[in-house]
Amino acid sequence: MSEQNPAELAAKFVNYTSKHIFLTGKAGTGKTTFLRNLIELTHKKAVIAAPTGIAAINAAGVTIHSLFQLPFGTYLPKAPAADGDHYNQQYNTPKSIVRHLNMTATKRKVLTDMELLIIDEVSMLRADLLDAIDMVLRYIRRNNSASFGGVQVLFIGDLHQLPPVVKSTEWNLLGQFYNSAYFFDALALQNNPPIYIELEKIYRQADEVFINLLNNLRNNEVTAQDVALLDKYYKADFKPSIDDKYITLTTHNNKADTLNRQSLEELKSPSFLYVAKIEDDFSEYAYPAEHILELKVGAQVMFIKNDPTGEQRFFNGKIAVVTSLRTDTIEVETEGTREKIVLEKYTWKNIKYTTDKVTGEIEEELVGTFTQYPLKLAWAITVHKSQGLTFDRAIIDIGSAFAPGQIYVALSRLRSLDGLILTSQISGSGIRQDQNVSFFSKTKENQENLNTQIRTESDVFLRSYLLQCFDLAPLDNYVYEHVHSYTKDINKSAKQKHVKWAGQLLKDLTEVKVNASKFLTQIQRMYEVKTEKGMAALLERTVAAENYFNPLLVGFSKRIFERMELVKQDKQVTAYLTELLEMEALFYDQFKKIRKATALLSATINGSEFTKKDVNALLSQAERAAVMEKVFAVPGKLDFTAKKTKSTKAKTTVVKEKAPKVDTKEVSLELHKEGKTIAEIARDRKMVIGTIEGHLAHYVAKQEISAKDIIGSKKLDKIMKTIRELKTMQMNPIREHLGRDYSFGEIKIGLAAYLAEGE
């Protein structure tokens, strides 16, 4: 195997081994690009998760807590010592999580089918949360012997950035089980640590002196020369000219909000307000941009997305100045150019993972969208929110109170030292990294060792994958359990009439399983011969096995489908039809696994890449869709698996025209007019309260309903007064001024009322 760059090597470890991987790299080395490319190409069934809502939206994934249905708070792998000081502290254990684990069949199938779990922004992931993920996957997948229930995990992030948050009271408990709060100290990884791969080419900086300084910061090797170098950029009372386009990096939200608000107020031009369009389910805690964006001509702004047109006119973090505003148009001029850009709105997607009814593959389902101009005021930003951004000029104002890694995060946002201003001096002791991170960094293997390791691990993976795909024991066990579920009186259960058919199905499958077990022994024996001739013989035998087993599996699927047609002649059989459908899906999954195993073996022997496109080419989705359309149909209904919806309209036998899709906001409006509270509407519609508040705020802004009827005149008056006093439409400073008695939803409705008045 020739020398490969770290990104190629990481992709090989993902696609052709089962090892966990930690992919890291200095800011600007291309971690986000790697993730995007991997999802496009990997042949594995992959799911993306992240520790926070905003991180999940930006990674095009879901939150860890929603995916694994985990409660917030401390997780302990077992109950703490009886003599410990923990009696007033709440914590979760495996027993308490399993007791409240009420997953839908769809979510269970996603976790059961998943082959690759990608966790982005892993610097924020706590060790106890990772152990909770491990516990849930072992439980759901019924595989307690393998870490994460046999799922490969790819961790992406930079541990030299912001650390996981742990309160001192939480650490009193966690310290009994963990060396540190970082993910790499999770118990799940102690016997199966991740392969450490670092992307080393820096795309953000080209200044060698600056790169060396950042490297020393990361590696806890800061020298006196480094401190002296930083001291050159110390200017305590620096006040930039408005034309200099500096952005201030600070530690707290309120400080950044205050700087932005004051700078906006200094501009004499009128304000324009741009309200985001929120559709369906999109939590306000995951809003990727301002809900109400207030701008003036001359305002310094920052792009929060790369140019979606591909023309690279701007990138995430690029500074610009607003040059023209109208009610439906924003024009800006980017830093360093005279080019004016008329912006288009961008739509962020909130997704959830589900499985396709026809193919059984994991897919994304859109559950909500957030549409807004991809801009934010940019005289100031917090260090935390600056992660992933790139600036040409920055004033770093972090004083003496900061977490390990914040100095590195702040400095690494810059392209070069030429754009740096420090408003507080930084001592050598103040920029040390966390010792646990430094120790873990030393586990990184050199390139030569990784190249050797991937050859070994690829062999292990391919052998294991072949054995797994031709192993019919799990399928046989499932059918065995199904046969033993026919326990009702034949006069009271339509299902019971088919018990003999089910018994014969099991008998025939068990005979096939015996032959499959013999082939597993052949694979193990033939895999020992690693010569070119030996591998060619293995491929020939595997192709023959596929040609033998897959027609039999197709035959079993056909028998189940034929039985379902008989079952449909009885009434009240939806539950039984669903059982048969789930059982057939397992036969189809086994069929797909065998096809994929043979193709993967062939690609490996021929030295060719094996991608998602190759997997899709193995199956005829159109043919499967045609078969399933007939399977789903029952008398009087096109799809017996479709969820029932309540309807007050009389039933009709002929539908001449498809009814237009009802605006989800209108449904909330009608329920509000019926006198229901926001909490009642959210409960009835199975949505979060913030979504319903957003729906009603839309109609408050249009003056169709009164804000007073929703939040009361006292609260409304206080919110309106605060907006006028602070001269801002941003919710965070308004909330800080009003206090916790006012929810973000109430403030959102107050802002809508303010907009309705046209002030």
Image (tube, grey):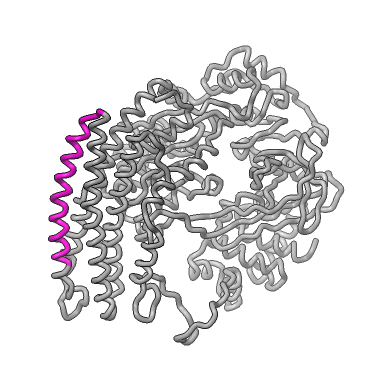
Image position of 431 with respect to 594: above or below: above
The image position of residue 249, as x and y in percent, is: 67, 34
| Quadrant into which the N terminus falls | top left
Q: Is residue 505 left or right of residue 404?
A: left
Stretch in magenta: 502-531
Give the residue at x 64% y 47%. Answer: 308
The image position of residue 415, as x and y in percent, is: 67, 28
Q: Report which quarter residue 118 is drawn in.
A: top left
Give the residue at x 39% y 64%. Answer: 625
**Is 499 colored magenta in this rendering?**
no
Image position of 593 with respect to 154: above or below: below
| Quadrant into which the C terminus falls | bottom right
State whether residue 260 appears in this view. Answer: yes
Q: Between 461 and 108, which is closer to the camera in this rendering? A: 461
Dominant SS of magenta comes to: helix
Image position of 549 with respect to 123: above or below: below
The image position of residue 295, as x and y in percent, is: 77, 50
The image position of residue 726, as x and y in percent, is: 75, 51
